[in-house]
Amino acid sequence: MRVAVLISSRGSNMQALVRASQAEGFPAEIVTVLSNNPDAAGLEFARQHDIPAKVINHRDFDNREDFDAAMSDYLAAQKVDLICLAGFMRLLTPDFVNRWRDRIINIHPSLLPAFKGLHVHERAIESGTRFTGCTVHYVRPEMDDGPIVAQAVVPILRDDTTDILAKRILVQEHRIYPLALKLIAERKVRIHGSIATISDAAEVEGSLTNPQVID
Ligand code: GRF
């Protein structure tokens, strides 16, 4: 499976995907890293790992439609089968999402459908909820919506700051994003309406929700 990873800045999830994909026998290949931000730190990592790193700067376009069309054309030319959004901070037009329907996934640092949108860690702490986490999901035109592929649960501890909580969640993001990509590339994930199911997953389903590593 030919995969593009879209980033806007740090790119630590992209790095986790690249590292996983370079393991022997991994069923997907990261064929390009695409950023809307020419200064995204993750671009350097991609170049160092011999992955074509492409910038399509949204500021060079008059409107969202033209920017998204340029991205679509590039991704189609690269013969991309699956797009992984990994800290990509631009809203996508419905046209883009529909053109790549069921071929775009995203990672979000909460247990969706709770805490969609921005300032997620701060809002989770302020809500008083005891648990949050992260979610890999297929992308639909509505923000942070779409069939859920993988989640991990992370506790919120009494003295957590947003930074401490974000770091604890990030550990889990780096675990479940490669796992979700692997399952999709192995064609084990099926979409039924708003639900994604994983075939042959008696043992993986536990690991998709099990927090495992908690600092
Ligand atoms: C991650 O927390 C991800 O869940 C969210 O944006 C952040 C990106 O971090 N969508 P990175 O660029 O992958 O390090």
Image (spheres, rainbow, N blue to C red):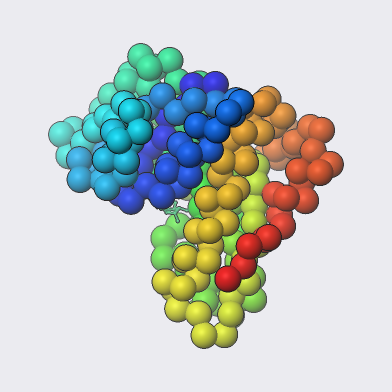
Observer-nearest residue: 121 or 4?
4
Q: Quadrant of residue 64?
A: top left
What x and y, as percent, mark residue 86?
43, 44
Q: Is residue 168 visible?
A: yes
Q: In the figure, 92 relative to 103: above or below?
A: below
Residue at position x 56%, y 41% in the image: 178
Q: In the figure, 58 relative to 207: above or below?
A: above
Residue at position x 33%, y 51% in the image: 10
In this rendering, would 73 be left or right of 178?
Answer: left
Q: Is residue 104 visible?
A: no
Residue at position x 70%, y 37% in the image: 196
For this orientation, the residue located farthest to the front is 24
In this rendering, would 199 be left or right of 48?
Answer: right
In this rendering, would 204 be left or right of 90?
Answer: right
What x and y, as percent, mark residue 207?
73, 50
What x and y, as percent, mark residue 28?
55, 26
Q: Quadrant of residue 37?
A: top left
Residue at position x 32%, y 20% in the image: 74
Q: Give the position of the C terminus as an image quadrant.
A: bottom right
Q: Give the position of the N terminus as an image quadrant.
A: top right
Q: In the figure, 129 relative to 11: above or below?
A: below
What x and y, as percent, mark residue 57?
21, 36
